[in-house]
Image: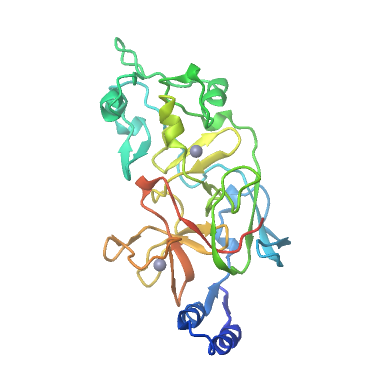
Amino acid sequence: MKKVTLFLFATMTLTLANSCSKDSDETTSSTTEAVVIDVESANFLSAGLSEPITIVSKTLSNGKTVDCYKIVVTSLATDHDMGPWCPGNISDDATQGGIWLEGGEVYDVDGAFVKNLATFYKDTQWMMYNATTGAITKTSTKEECAGAAIPDVGTAYKNYCVQCLPSYLGTLSTTYYLPVTPVAASSVISFGGAGPQSTGPSSRGIAFNGVVFDAPAPTSNILAAYTLAPFDDAGGHINLNAGYHYHAAMGKTTQIAQADGHAAMIGYAFDGYGMFQNLNPTTGLAYTDLDASLGHYDDIRGYHYHVDYAGKNNFINSLHGEYVK
Ligand SMILES: [Zn+2]
Ligand SMILES: [Zn+2]
């Protein structure tokens, strides 16, 4: 059972306060969010957790201190295979490689894709395989992964297919906080990058397996260094600091089907609002009433997001609610 928190009283107060205002839109938007769905900690798979989920007090981005779930994850997927990423030879088929995201499309990184890179990117400097043997040049040790799987790829790894294997990771535990009850922000919160100037979080949310839905992969940096850092068929890859993380929702992670035929739920954004699959399973089309954050509201799920097309290297555009700083 999901716990539903009703803010009817607050909504009515707001309606009264707004009745003198000429802007009737504000009244409408507050009344349409009467249903707020709490985060359900039992939705997270215990296999992906380093310790049981607990409730702690944390300060939100609006300065208020609220109950939050403390979620400590292993940053490894336990509900699907991780990899493969780089194929071994230009003769390899799609089962031996992962995917690449370009121009809104998802491409299989099979041997032919690697062979065709110079044509694909219209740049003859691409040459990621041995012309005699067909062997694809790729990182093959933890040290090579550490040197190449960074945003600022060195020239030493020019024309490498970059992959880091789960076996390179020690025991990781990464802590995330979600407000138990999502709190709508007065205006949307944009995502920040790394560093002190960051306004919002960099990562977008977490899948039920505890793996993070990360910021877009820095594909322009990766490509500028003539490297490819493929994602596996689940949309994830590994770096030594973050562990396994997603850049695309490929429908391979644990989902919660919706009884009314709505798209399935795949996780939570960092404001505690649910994240759901991209397409409406009934129509096979994307939802057309999404706001700029890629969310909308209904009376069953409250406010929630629908993730972007996998090929977009993106999940959601901004946060609708407050997050734990
Ligand atoms: Zn990444
Ligand atoms: Zn929806």
Quadrant of res 54: bottom right
Quadrant of the image containing the C terminus? bottom right
Tell me: residue 263, above or below residue 91: below
Q: From where the camera sits, is residue 278 visible?
A: yes
Q: Where does ligand 2 appear, by image quarter?
A: bottom left
Q: Is residue 289 left or right of residue 162?
A: left
Residue visible at 47% across and 71% down in the picture: 301
Closer to us: 10 or 241: 10
Closer to us: 83 or 147: 147
Q: Is residue 52 left or right of residue 257?
A: right
Quadrant of res 61: bottom right
Q: From where the camera sits, is residue 256 visible?
A: no
Q: Is residue 83 left or right of residue 188?
A: left
Q: Is residue 224 left or right of residue 127?
A: right
Residue 176, position as x, y percentages in the image = 64, 52
Quadrant of the image containing the N terminus? bottom right
Residue visible at 56% across and 45% down in the picture: 193
Outermost front residue: 22
Residue 210, position as x, y percentages in the image = 56, 50
Residue 58, position as x, y percentages in the image = 72, 61
Residue 188, position as x, y percentages in the image = 53, 63
Closer to us: 205 or 194: 194
